[in-house]
Image (cartoon, helix red, strand yellow):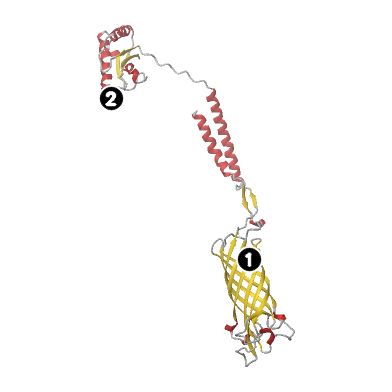
Amino acid sequence: MKKFALLVIVCASYLLPMLTSAQEVTYVEDPSQGYLFNRMRDNWFITADGGVGIMMSPYDKHEHFGHRIGAKADLFVGKWFSPILGLRGGFDYEQIKGATWTGNYAALGYRNWPRQLDGGKYVPQHFNNFGLVGDVMFNLTNWIVGYKPYRFYNAIFYVGMTVNWVYCRDGARPVSDGPWKYGANDDPDHSRNYSMQAGLLNSFAITKKIDFNVDLRFDLMQEHIDGAGMGYRTWNEYPSILLGMTYKFGKSEWNAPVTAVCPEWKYTDAEGDALVANLNDANRKIADLQNQLRDCLEKKPEAKKATEAPLATVYFPINRTEVLGVQRNVVEAVAEVMKNENRNYMLTGWADNYTGNDKINVRLRKGRVATVKQELVKRGVAENRLETEINNGELTDYGPKCASLDRAVTIHRK
């Protein structure tokens, strides 16, 4: 049994390192193959922002810079279709402030304007645009350095178009008092205009669902700065900066296709040869152990040599050392045998370990063996042929109920 256990240990010591060193095939996401499309309900977002913009038409330079700054706000709903490409649409508000030439009556509703510029050649203008906007969005960060979920900063470029509906003061009364109305006085060309916009949305992740945005935008706005009857239109610049927040709905991260990765062989030719040599050596040792195990299993067990029975056993009552009763006959018979044999004998004193204590039991063992030797010498057995000893163990070890069998002196031939 011990040899079999040794065989198992040796096999494990040689084979376990080889087994553990062999890597299993693993399955990982592979971004190089692109990313999977999410469900239609995922990757939606809503963005609200607000800020200021400045009109840059040809006549605006005649107005003070601070008077040209107007409010701007947006509300978008959008969806990312991949880590790079997205769309958004929403509502846009722009407050347009600047200057126009004095003859521009119909377009801007400035009659009786209380303030004139450059000696009356130009007057301030102020109107509001309310529009519908749509943008195509490109995540430059994911495109250039690769997609990473929950990245703190993303640079998003966008480009789009807006349809604006124009509201301005009623020109029939002083501009500062006239009500806001749709269109620019009686000029139908000023009821609606169009703009193209592009910008860089700087997105900073606050949580997995909420981003803080800094939007740098440039609008190229179709503006009618010359009023009715002039017959031409111009495109004017309207740069702006906006701050806002984005909230993401549903799943916002992306998963790449899963591919299998096979383990690579990481050993040189010399290392491989050494592993083969170790394996061959292990196989030889295993074969040798198998042969030893087979021989061990086939070998017949040796017959255990029977312990020679004592010549005689003399028994004693509990806590007594005297030879009493029928035990005297035993001693006399043993003495007759000893006198007719030319041999030596070993007398061993015993006591049960179930009663008394160690001190008492040692005294009983010594007293009993001394008594038996004395009786044998009395009956003519030479003292030099008798050796004595005591044994602190159990003579029979049959338990407390058979303790009387342990209170004895055994006599063995040497």
Does residue 95 appear anywhere in the picture?
A: yes
The tag on residue 358 is 2
- Residue 17: x and y, percent? 55, 41
Mark 1 vs mark 2, foreground winner is 1
Q: Is residue 7 above or below residue 391?
A: below
- Residue 69: x and y, percent? 59, 80
Left or right of 333 on screen, residue 248: right
Does residue 263 appear anywhere in the picture?
A: no
| Three-letter code, disc 2 | Asp
Left or right of 41 on screen, residue 398: left
Q: Secondary structure at mark 1?
A: strand
Task: Specify the quadrant of the image occupied by residue 371.
Answer: top left
The tag on residue 398 is none
Q: Of the residues under marks 1 and 2, which one precedes in the sequence?
A: 1
Pointers 1 and 2 in contact (CB under 8 A)?
Answer: no
The residue wearing badge 1 is 77
Left or right of 2 on screen, residue 341: left
- Residue 191: x and y, percent? 70, 79
Which quarter of the rendering shows the C terminus? Answer: top left
Left or right of 387 on screen, residue 226: right
Give the alpha-carbon distance from disc 1 to disc 2, as whole Å.
Answer: 97 Å
Front one among 315 and 155? 155
Residue depicted at 49% across the width and 20% down the height = 301
- Residue 409: x and y, percent? 31, 15
| Three-letter code, disc 1 | Val
Task: Specify the quadrant of the image occupied by residue 310.
Answer: top left
Q: Is residue 107 above or below residue 303?
A: below
Residue depicted at 58% across the width and 35% down the height = 283
Q: Is residue 277 above or below residue 55?
A: above
Count residues near mark 1 (Cα–Cα under 10 Å), then give few for <14, some for 14-19, many for 20+: some
Residue depicted at 38% across the width and 13% down the height = 309
